[in-house]
Image (cartoon, rainbow, N blue to C red):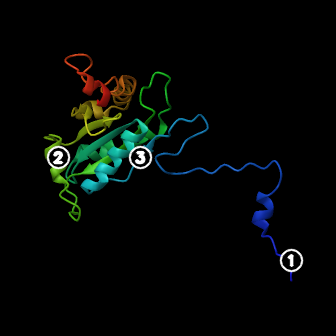
């Protein structure tokens, strides 16, 4: 019987003292400081995609910023690159109550109606003007954390960054369980 050949790749991997680090591109990947990394998602075109992003934000205590847009929204073409840059370059702060930050556009006039009508999300979350920036986050990510409709503020890099910092520091309004003591019963304290 012929001796088994070991591939050069496996020879390299079997060297003593060699450590290999793989970097994942998934929302749950961690960095060396065990902080979740910020992420920019593909535009949302279907309700199931929307709900998947919400579940991911909830599971990882991430602030998910969603910019509700349409193809005819001219300010959206200016605001989207600002938000993308802000999310990708924002470093975590010790005062942040969310573990990470993510962003996606919700294209309300998307032609994909295979998994439901995307415009129903606009009605469900009370979107009355374009663009509308909505923050979802914490353990009950289906609840709106923050809402911003001021296009002047969204178009100003400094003011938008300050707004995001404020929301990240505030954290999940439902984290303490229930309504913060105003009529919060035992069940609402246990189950939020």
The picture places residue 155, in percent across and down from the top left corner, at: 30, 35
Q: What element does badge 2 sit on?
A: helix
The first of marks 2 and 1 along the sequence is 1
Given this view, does label 2 or label 1 mark the residue nearer the observer?
Answer: 1
| Spatial separation of the CA atoms under disc 2 and disc 1 | 65 Å
Q: Mark 3 points at which residue?
A: 40
What is the quadrant of residue 100 in the picture? top left
Q: Mark 2 points at which residue?
A: 122
Q: Residue at horizontal 16%, vertical 41%?
A: 127
Given this view, does label 1 or label 3 mark the residue nearer the observer?
Answer: 1
Q: Name the residue under label 1.
A: 3
The answer to whether residue 135 is above or below residue 50 is above
The first of marks 3 and 2 along the sequence is 3
| Spatial separation of the CA atoms under disc 3 and disc 2 | 21 Å
Query: Which residue sits furthest front?
Result: 186
The picture places residue 12, in percent across and down from the top left corner, at: 79, 60
State the mark number for residue 13. none
Q: Do the residues bearing badges 2 and 1 touch, measured as CB atoms within 8 Å?
A: no
| Spatial separation of the CA atoms under disc 1 and disc 3 | 49 Å
The first of marks 1 and 3 along the sequence is 1
Q: In front here: 31 or 166?
A: 31
- Which quarter of the rendering shows the C terminus? top left
């Amino acid at each position: 019987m012929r001796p088994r050949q070991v591939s050069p790749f496996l020879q390299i991997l079997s060297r003593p003292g060699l450590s290999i680090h793989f970097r994942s591109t998934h929302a749950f990947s961690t960095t060396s400081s065990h902080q979740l990394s910020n992420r920019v998602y593909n535009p949302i075109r279907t309700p199931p995609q929307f709900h998947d992003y919400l579940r991911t934000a909830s599971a990882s205590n991430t602030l998910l910023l969603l910019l509700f847009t349409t193809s005819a929204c001219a300010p959206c073409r200016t605001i989207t690159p600002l938000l993308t840059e802000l999310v990708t370059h924002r470093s975590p702060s010790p005062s942040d109550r969310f573990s990470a930050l993510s962003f996606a556009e919700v294209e309300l006039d998307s032609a994909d109606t295979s998994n439901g009508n995307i415009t129903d999300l606009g009605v469900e979350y009370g979107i009355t003007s374009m663009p509308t920036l909505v923050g979802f986050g914490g353990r009950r990510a289906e609840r709106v954390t923050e809402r911003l409709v001021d296009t002047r503020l969204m178009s100003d890099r400094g003011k938008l960054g300050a707004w995001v910092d404020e929301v990240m520091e505030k954290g999940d309004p439902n984290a303490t369980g229930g309504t913060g003591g105003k009529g919060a019963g035992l069940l609402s304290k246990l189950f939020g």
